[in-house]
Amino acid sequence: MSEQLETPLRSIRSNAVWTFAANAVFSGMRWLTIVVLVRWGSSELVGQYVLGLAITQPIFMLAGLDMSSAQATDAKRDFSFREYSALRSLTVPLAVAVTAGLLFFLDLGSETSLVVMLIAGTKVIGAADLLYFGVFAQHERLDKAGKTMIGRGVLGLAGFVALLLWTGSLPWALVGMAAGWLIVLAVYAAPQSAALVASERADNVVQLPLRTIWRGRRLRQLAWLILPLGIAALLSSLTYNIPRYVV
């Protein structure tokens, strides 16, 4: 009996440690990104970067509908990974389109608009990662989610710093960040998620890329079910970013 209890407790402790470590590292890397911009960039670049985050974050938070949390709590598998993937495949391009439309009306200038759209590009990669985080959480493998976050933080910052120092350009630095995130997504997050999804299949076959299922009625049901999560995420993001809009 004690051994049966010890295994779940060990798993809970491990998941908690990985979650804390991953959030600490990723937050640290985001902070270092600002430090690098201040040290080797300019106040204008810092302003463009912060503005880009302020514009894109609420849009992508709403579009994300906090799907990873919904996946993690979907213990009965009422909706499949493919259905979550299909819904995200609809909402993420919509978020990009909304961002582009907002920039058209704000008329921030070509350079700032480019920075904002490149930040939106990193959000697209982040949205894919969050989809895989949901798979990791469903299978209680937060160690894999933690490794993904740490990898994103480290490689993203490395790519950002390397191209900023090489070119002195914020857009190119953001390309470097996106490349780092994409490497982690392609090399680790996607294959690991595919293996976990395959473990639920009768034939245990790993399929890459993980495919989506397009069922209109089911997608509408899923979207309506998790819409409150997206609205809550939007309001939280707006509360955090309102001071940036005022400044």
Image (spheres, helix red, strand yellow):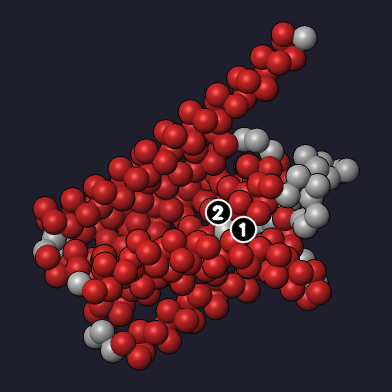
Residue plotted at (36% across, 73% down): 55
Residue plotted at (58% across, 47% down): 133
Query: Badge 1 is on which residue?
Result: 67
Marks 1 and 2 sit apart, C-alpha to C-alpha, by 8 Å
> Is residue 145 found left or right of 140 in the rendered image?
left
**Residue most toward the top?**
2
Query: Which image quarter: residue 15?
Result: top right
* Residue 126 percent coordinates (x, y): 48, 58
> Is 12 drawn above or below residue 49 in the view shown?
above
Identity, as a three-letter code, of the amino acid under mark 2:
Leu
Name the image quarter holding the N terminus: top right
Query: Which image quarter: residue 115?
Result: bottom left
> Is 167 drawn above or below residue 6 in the view shown?
below
Tell me, yes or no, whether the two marked residues, 1 and 2, touch with CB atoms within 8 Å.
Answer: yes
* Residue 189 percent coordinates (x, y): 56, 46
Residue plotted at (35% across, 56% down): 177
Question: How packed is label 2: few (under 14 Cα within 10 Å), some, or many (20 or more)?
Answer: many
**Residue closer to the observer: 138 or 238:** 238
> Is 11 drawn above or below residue 189 in the view shown?
above
Query: Badge 2 is on which residue?
Result: 130
| SS at circle 1 | helix
Name the image quarter holding the C terminus: bottom left
> Is residue 63 found left or right of 198 in the rendered image?
left
**If you read the primary sequence from the N terminus, does the residue marked by circle 1 or circle 2 appear first?**
1
| SS at circle 2 | helix
The answer to whether residue 105 of the structure is visible from this angle is yes
The answer to whether residue 169 of the structure is visible from this angle is no
* Residue 222 percent coordinates (x, y): 73, 66
Label number found at residue 169 = none
Identity, as a three-letter code, of the amino acid under mark 1:
Met
